[in-house]
Amino acid sequence: MKIGIISLGGKSSLELAKACKKYFGSVGILNLKDFKVKLTEGKINVHYEGGDLEEYDCLYVRGSFKYGLLQRAITRALNKNIYMPIKPQAFTIGHDKFLTLLELQKNKLSVPKTYYAGTTKTAKEILKEVNYPIIMKLQEGTHGKGVMIAETLKSAKTVLDLLEGFKKPYIIQEFVPTEGTSDIRAIVCGNKVLASYKRVAAEDEIRTNIHSGGKREKHELSKEEEKLAIASAKIVGCEICGVDILNAKEPSVIEINLSPSLYSVEEISGVNVMKKIAQCLYNQTIKFKEKKEKKMMEKIEKKNEKNEKNDNHLDDNSKTKSSSKKRFSLLSNLISKSNPLTWPKIIFG
């Protein structure tokens, strides 16, 4: 079987490609930037490096939120015939922090108290209602960029002035105290959590992201945290993702990462995540192909049954016509041989 890993060429994607070589006969590393999607009447065409995309049994799409629409378009065009672990809508929901929380809250999963403001004026009105400290962030972004904390209304207004330059909507969340200023990252694959670890913020920092100076520590998920991670991934439409959970007495989901860092996770968790994901992709591809073949066979069988019914109906019609001809011929013979004088008299009024 053949797998293609579509990404921006990060360490995680390259290491995963190596792990996939143990299970797949062919592994392709494809640059997301070299894809284009062409729409024609009744057809969606996906091109790579100027030509038609080769045939694959599995495609795993990774990469930045900046390419979310392209990721969704590629997946929407191909996921009926190729196994792809992330559903098209996930690239819209999962790359947007507020849409993620909205979808999870609709499905009754625990999320922090969150406000969404489309304008600076609305955001300033929200700042008068909330309990401080608060977290203020943009709805898109990675590595903790665009995330700030405000201890008071005065500092919140200053932060708002800084964020206004991005000309984007605001997300405002009431700060939830966590153990040692940390959150939990759960790596979900299929219907289970493969590995988890705690991300601890650097001194005088609230952002736990590694790119913001945070460090990773081993963490064993509670049953509640594990259920929350698996349910969140399923609701958003990801068979592979990272789920970020507040490390608090009452855990709640703060974000879902469609392209989580997998590199060196084994060092912290003790789990060979690359191998586990490669195995998962291989097994799910086999299941997808079997399901696809089964549907095709059922379709063929239904078509054959329909043809048989039509053939039987034609045979019945032929037999009926033949029988009618025989009866008519017999009746004609009887009439021609009979004596007209013996026919019954017909009396008209």
Image (cartoon, helix red, strand yellow):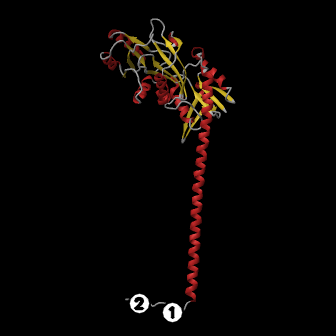
**Disc 2 marks which residue?**
347
Which residue of the protein is positioned furthest toward the front in this rendering?
223
Q: Residue at x 63, y 20 (%)?
A: 15
> Picture coordinates of residue 336 (x, y %)?
57, 87
Vertical comparison of 58 with 270: above or below: below
Identify the disc placed on residue 330. none
Which residue of the protein is positioned furthest toward the bottom in this rendering?
341
Quadrant (top left/top right/bottom left/bottom right) for the C terminus: bottom left
Q: Is residue 143 left or right of residue 160?
A: right
Query: Given this view, does label 2 or label 1 mark the residue nearer the observer?
Result: 1
Q: Residues within 10 Å of mark 1 (few under 14, many from 20)?
A: few
Q: Is residue 91 left or right of residue 276?
A: left
Q: Quadrant of residue 314?
A: bottom right
Mark 2 lies on a secondary structure that is loop
Q: Residue at x 60, y 19 (%)?
A: 271
Q: Residue at x 57, y 55 (%)?
A: 306
